[in-house]
Image (tube, rainbow, N blue to C red):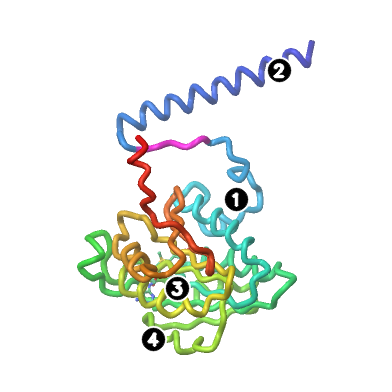
Amino acid sequence: MTKKFLKFLRNSLSRREDRKLNALKTFGHWLFPNYRFSWPQLDWWDDPEFNEYLRKFEEPDGFNTHRKWMLLQLLRLTSCVPGDTAECGVFRGASSWLICAANRSNKNYARVHHLFDSFEGLSEPSVLDGAHWAKGNLAVGEDLVRRNLENFGNIQVHKGWIPERFANCENIRFSFVHIDVDLYEPTRDSIEFFYDRINQGGILLCDDYGFTTCPGATKAIDEFLEGKPEKMVALDAGSGFLIKGISTATKDIGIGQYL
Ligand SMILES: C[S@@+](CC[C@H](N)C(=O)[O-])C[C@H]1O[C@@H](n2cnc3c(N)ncnc32)[C@H](O)[C@@H]1O
C-alpha cells in the first residue's frame, strides 16, 4: 500500500516537472523565440562538489556552468599527456582553479600552471571584434586571483599584455592550454605561441569559440588552423577544442546536400 502510494506520488511529481518545463518553454518562446531549452535531467546539475565549486565562484545558476563542466571533462582526456598547463585570460581564476585541481590530482606528472593576464581587463578591440566588448572590460586584480588559487602551489603568474610575457615559457611543453581573451589579436597571438608547444594528445580549448559576441576570437582560431590537420570541435554550449595530432574534418561537412 505504502509502496503504491509512493510510486503514485513520484509519478505525479515527475509529471508536474514535465508540466513546469513545458510552461517554461512556452513562456520562454514567447519572450525569446529562438531560445533552445535543453533537458534538465542531467546528473552533473546535482553533483555536490561541482556545485560547491560553482558557488565558490558565484556561478551556481550562471551562464557558464556548461562550459565549466566541459572543461573539467576535457582535462581528464589529457591526464596521461606530459606537459604544463596554461590559461590566457584568467579573470577571477574560475577556470584556472579547475585546471589546478586536475593538476593536483594527477598522479602521472607534477605540472606547473601558467596564468597570463593583463589584470587590467581586455585590450583594445579591433574592427574584427564587433561591438560587444570595450577596452578594460573584465578587469580583476592579481591579488584576488592569487587568493582564489591559494590552495594550489604549482602556479606561475605572468602579468602583462599578451603576447609580452610568452617569452617566459619559450622552452616549456604543454598538455592543456585554455585561451579565453575574447578578442581577435590576443587569441591569434596565443594560438600562434602555444600550438607548436602542445604535446601530441594535448588539448587547446578556446572558451570564446563560436560565440557571436566574440567573432574575432573564432576568426583568429580558424585562420590559424587553415592548412593544419586539426580543426576546432565546437561545443553546443559555446567554446571549442582541438586535440593535438588528431586530424579533424572541416566545419562544413555539407549536411545540406542530404536534406
Ligand atoms: C573572459 S575573461 C577570462 C575568464 C576566465 N578564463 C574564467 O574562466 O573565468 C577575459 C580575460 O582576458 C584578459 N585579457 C583580455 N585581453 C588581454 C590581453 N590582450 N592581454 C592580457 N590579458 C587580456 C582580461 O583581463 C580578462 O581577465
Name the residue type under label 1.
Asn
| Vertical relation: 259 (above or below) 203 | above
Which residue is label 2 attached to? 7
Q: Nearer the viewer, mark 1 or mark 4?
A: 4
- Of the image marks 1 and 2, the number of the one nearer the N terminus: 2
Q: State whether label 3 is within 8 Å of ligand 1.
A: yes
The magenta segment is 35-39
Q: Check contact, mark 3 vs mark 1: CB within 8 A.
A: no
For the C terminus, the quadrant is top left
The amino acid marked with disc number 3 is: Cys
Pointer 2 or 3: first along the chain? 2
Mark 4 — residue?
164
Q: Is residue 31 magenta?
A: no
Q: How far is disc 2 from disc 3 in space, using C-alphas?
A: 51 Å
Main SS, magenta residues: loop
- The residue at which mark 3 appears reads as 88
